[in-house]
Amino acid sequence: MRNYMVRNDRTNGYDLFDDAFESFFKPEFNKEKFDSMKTDVKETDTGYEMGIEVPGFDKKDINVALEDGYLTISANKKEVEDNNGGKKSNYLRRERNYSCSRSYYVGDVKEKDIKAKYENGILNIFIPKEQPKELDSHLIEIE
């Protein structure tokens, strides 16, 4: 299973100075930050079980879609307005995500066979394994 992470609204809550030093100390191959939607994948006899962290979102804010062999989980919610007695709050740093998405290559599976359940900030997804195809064997005549 390959996975790709897509972060929406990258500029919200990130300090370019901090990002420059953070990336300086990391190896070149680890360019993406995987600080949201952390995922555990476990293989069973019948399929794969995924546990994806989506804290702070309600079930209605989360979408799971399957397209061209990619399972994409996205979570979006409206930013909470800060009512500080009519004053505008001047945040120095905001680290909460209000929108995130992550895709996983799962291959050719049927959408109706995938099961998903959201509980206590964890999205649990079950993807059944494909049944191996029986191949016919026969000799090919050489001309």
Image (cartoon, rainbow, N blue to C red):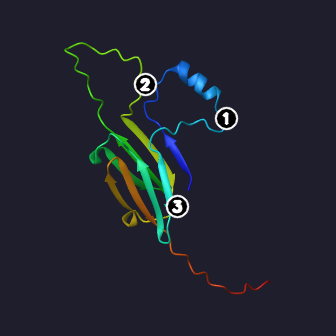
Kindly check if marks 3 and 2 are in contact, taking CB atoms under 8 A apart as contact: no
Q: Earlier in the sequence, mark 3 or mark 1?
A: 1
Secondary structure state at the residue bearing disc 3: loop
User: Dot 1, how many residues are within 10 Å of its Cα: few (below 14), some (14-19), or many (20+)?
Assistant: few
Query: Distance between the Cα atoms at labels 2 and 1?
Result: 23 Å
Looking at the picture, how far across and down is residue 62, in whole percent?
A: 33, 46
Q: Which residue is mark 3?
A: 107
Q: Is residue 85 above or below residue 102?
A: above
Looking at the picture, how far across and down is residue 93, in whole percent?
A: 42, 21
User: Dot 3, how many residues are within 10 Å of its Cα: few (below 14), some (14-19), or many (20+)?
Assistant: some
Q: Which residue is mark 2?
A: 13
Query: Distance between the Cα atoms at labels 3 and 1?
Result: 30 Å
Q: Is residue 135 above or below residue 105?
A: below
Q: Residue furthest left?
A: 85
Dot in front, 3 or 2: 2
Kindly check if marks 3 and 1 are in contact, taking CB atoms under 8 A apart as contact: no
Q: In front: 4, or 28? A: 28
| Quadrant for the N terminus in the image | bottom right
Q: In front: 65, or 22? A: 22
Name the residue rendered at 67%, 35% in the picture: 27
Q: In front: 14, or 68? A: 14
Indicate left or right for 106 with 139 as reference.
left
Name the residue rendered at 45%, 56% in the picture: 50
Q: Earlier in the sequence, mark 2 or mark 1?
A: 2
Looking at the picture, how far across and down is residue 24, in whole percent?
A: 64, 26
Looking at the picture, how far across and down is residue 25, in whole percent?
A: 64, 28
Q: Is residue 108 above or below residue 10?
A: below
Q: Amino acid at mark 1?
A: Pro
Q: Which mark is residue 27?
A: 1
Name the residue rendered at 29%, 33% in the picture: 78
Q: Earlier in the sequence, mark 3 or mark 2?
A: 2
